[in-house]
Amino acid sequence: MKVKFRIRRFNPEVDKKPYWGEYTLDNVEPTDRILELLHRVKWEQDGTLTLRRSCAHGVCGSDAVRINGVNKLACKVLVKTLDLKDGGQVQVEPILGLPVVKDLVVDFEPFFDHYRAVMPYFMPATPRPGDGRERRQSPEDRARFDDTTKCILCACCTTSCPSFWASGEYVGPAAIVNAHRFIFDSRDGATQERLNILSEESGVWRCRTIFNCTPACPREIEVTRAIGEVKLAIQRNGR
Amino acid sequence: MATLVTTITETLRYKGKLGQWSWVLHRVSGLGVLLFLVLHVIDTSWAAFYPSLYAKAIAEYQSPIFTLGEFALTAAVVYHALNGLRIVIFDFRPEWWHLQQKAAMIVLASTIVLLIPIFGLMFGHVLDYYDTNPDFVTISEIIKTQAQFLLGFVVILAAALLLSLVYALVTGETRNPAKPNRRPSQFDAWMWRFMRLSGVLIVPLVFGHLLMIHLIQGVFDITTVGHTVVGTDLVNDSGRAVEFVGRRWDYLVAGIAIWRIYDGALLALVVIHGFNGLRYVVNDYAHDRVIKRALNWAIAFGAAALIILGFAALLAGVDETAYSIAKDSLETFSQRPTTPFGG
């Protein structure tokens, strides 16, 4: 089948404003992924098209883009899931809220700043066990934060959030998800510090339960739920 | 402010699901209700302090343009109330998140189902009133009055901006966006709780208020001679709006002025809830330090002023002299004949 690609282009060294580039691809299979087709545009039609990808298999989280109006990983979207007719259109643009470096590539630094702000690393509550082995945890305690261990930091959720579009100060869903992973880990000792960080002005209170983040997650993390649990944890802390 | 434009255009462009549109409707309906609330508290206080102005305000509320507004207001209140309950439920039961889309549908459907009989009853009052061939306040008259409110808002905003600018000059700060406050915001945590608690408390109060003032009787019956004042067994002898308010506030059950307490509770909860909602909107989109501080000051001032004004009116009440002042003034506004069901 034939598919028309409408891609948001911007080269800050040449262009004053972003514009839409249009490319038509023939012989597209329903099982083709959008990432492959973006490659075809780059390789067959316009070598200047810039995009980011690494593993190309939904694990590294580097090819988050907005496809037909929704944030997705280009490597995880098959043409047949887009309900296209022959000659149908696929619109691809960079995720919103982070500075565009070129075409589909955005600067993740502000996103990682928010991630680092929640101290996304293990801070043990207890000294290392005497036998030198792991800190043990019951299956129930492990299950408490299982969902939020799945994050690959692709920024699909954070850049789908109107609160983040409104203010880049907001730590955003991804940072809260990664804080959740440690806040609800029974072995971690820095719960209070993380809750304090997330109850700052730029923290969880900026979430308006819009629910754009949850369907945006390519790992099917229950993002809004995780944010809600962090809010309740702060509230129950007697503040 | 630039991010306000981005957010509006991108919200339209992003294919968010019902949750996103619920949020849009919640904000728009909230801001709409707040605008009316401000006008309503100010002019109701006139019943106590400027009876003649109050009569004029009610005459304007009975004009077609405000009747349209009344329908929109009712729709906004009903939607905001039901969607607010949805938000509260999922805030306290985040593990039910997978039901939120369905809940948003239920909110929309229930809003429509509730509005059908509500609009029916309201429309009945409109038809009854139009049967009496009333004289309406002219549009130009309405614009003249409402322009004064607009001017008031502009003056308050300008004063806040000026003060904020003076503050910036005195403290020597730059106009860059403020650095995020790096301390836990107990205020935000507290307001989060207050918004949910007040929201739930407001729902029965505001629905009761709607029921009494817009459904059981219409805004038009406020000026019906000999009409029994809703929620009381007292009769509005003069058919003046001030007497309606005065009778209602003076109605005692076991020595307690129940409608003053009711109105006072509604006033305090709704004003704080509404202005804090406005604060959320402002803090989302205002990034310039001076402007953000000015808007926050204006909001704090507005909320405090409305609560003080409203409670002053509730405490002062409306006395018999006010009834006669209202009666003597504004004879140009038609006095309604007694309707068959009045008194």
Image: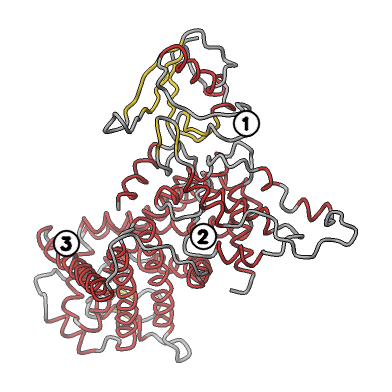
For mark 1, what is the residue?
A58
Q: Please state the horizontal and vertical placement of residue A160, each as a whole percent of the image.
A: 48, 42
For mark 3, what is the residue?
B134
Crowd rating for badge 1 (residues with CA inside 10 Å; few <14, some 14–19, many 20+): many
* Number of dots carrying numbers: 3
Tell me which amino acid carries mark 3: Pro
Q: Is residue B111 left or right of residue A115?
A: left
Tell me which amino acid carries mark 1: Gly
* Nearer the observer, B87 or A68: A68
Q: Is residue B299 above or below residue B317?
A: above
For mark 2, what is the residue?
A203
Q: Please state the horizontal and vertical placement of residue B253, each as a whole percent of the image.
A: 46, 86
Looking at marks 2 and 1 on the same chain, the residue that comes earlier in the sequence is marked by 1
Q: Please state the horizontal and vertical placement of residue B30, each as a whole percent of the image.
A: 38, 59
Tell me the distance, in whole angstroms, between the alpha carbons under discs 3 and 2.
Answer: 55 Å
Residue sitting at 63 percent across and 43 percent down? A151
Find numbered disc 1 in the image and state the secondary structure of the residue it sits on.
loop
Chain under label 2? A
Find numbered disc 2 in the image and state the secondary structure of the residue it sits on.
loop
Q: Is residue B127 at all visible to an observer of this figure?
A: no
Are the numbered discs 2 and 1 placed on the same chain, yes or no?
yes
Q: Is residue A25 above or below residue B190?
A: above
